[in-house]
Amino acid sequence: MGNMNIQQERRANPYPWTWEIPTAVALMVVLIMTLALHAARAIANVLAGAGWRFPAREELFTSLPGLLGGDAGAGLIGPSGRYASADALWVWIVLTEVVVLVVVGLVLRWGLAQRGPGRVQGMATAAESEQLLGISRLRRNAAIIRPDLHSKKGTR
């Protein structure tokens, strides 16, 4: 943990980590979770024979209480078909939300490793390290490093 603090202290941070970025990320996660709820309802309704339908944009958030209450037709406009049962709806909501949470968590972890405040800067890639410090460079420059052992003249 001490090395991490040294790394963070010795680099300049032109834009401080303030509330705007985490708030934007939180709002994006809420929007993605809301869309996943509607996708889960659409999947449940397709399997029940009601067709693949999403609510109108105006109903995106206002239909959530009915949807979370088990009504698979909440906010849908058009002819009411045979909507999915509350149990089937909940199964698809749980499955879809778990998948979305895992994907969002992995994306957030990757994003923080790439651009977050705790990222490590200035580290060489494995290919760059091999090019500068690896065995191939040592063999290529053996005559310079140990001219007594690897002279091109063939003499020792």
Image: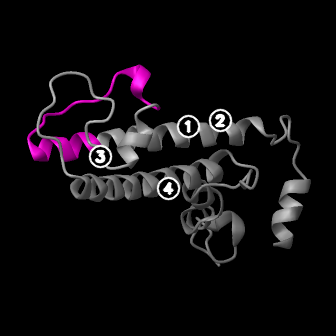
Which mark sits nearer the N-terminus, 2 or 3? Answer: 2
Q: Residue furthest right?
A: 9
Residue contact at pointers 4 and 1, CB within 8 angstroms: no
Q: CA distance from mark 3 to mark 1?
A: 18 Å
Amino acid at pointer 3: Ala
Q: CA distance from mark 2 to mark 4?
A: 17 Å
Residue contact at pointers 2 and 4, CB within 8 angstroms: no
The residue that disc 4 covers is: 106
Amino acid at pointer 2: Ala
Check disc 2: other Cα within 10 Å, few if <14, some if 14-19, many if 20+.
Answer: few
Q: In this rendering, which labeled residue sits more in front, label 4 or label 1?
A: 1
Q: Could you say where residue 142 lies in the image, as x and y percent from the top left?
A: 62, 67
Residue contact at pointers 1 and 2, CB within 8 angstroms: yes
Q: Which mark is residue 28?
A: 1
Q: CA distance from mark 1 to mark 2?
A: 6 Å
The residue that disc 3 covers is: 40
Residue extent of the magenta highlight: 40-61
Which mark sits nearer the N-terminus, 2 or 4? Answer: 2
Residue at x 87%, y 63% (from the top left corner): 5
Residue contact at pointers 3 and 1, CB within 8 angstroms: no
Amino acid at pointer 1: Met
User: Element at badge 4?
Assistant: helix
Q: Is residue 36 left or right of residue 149?
A: left
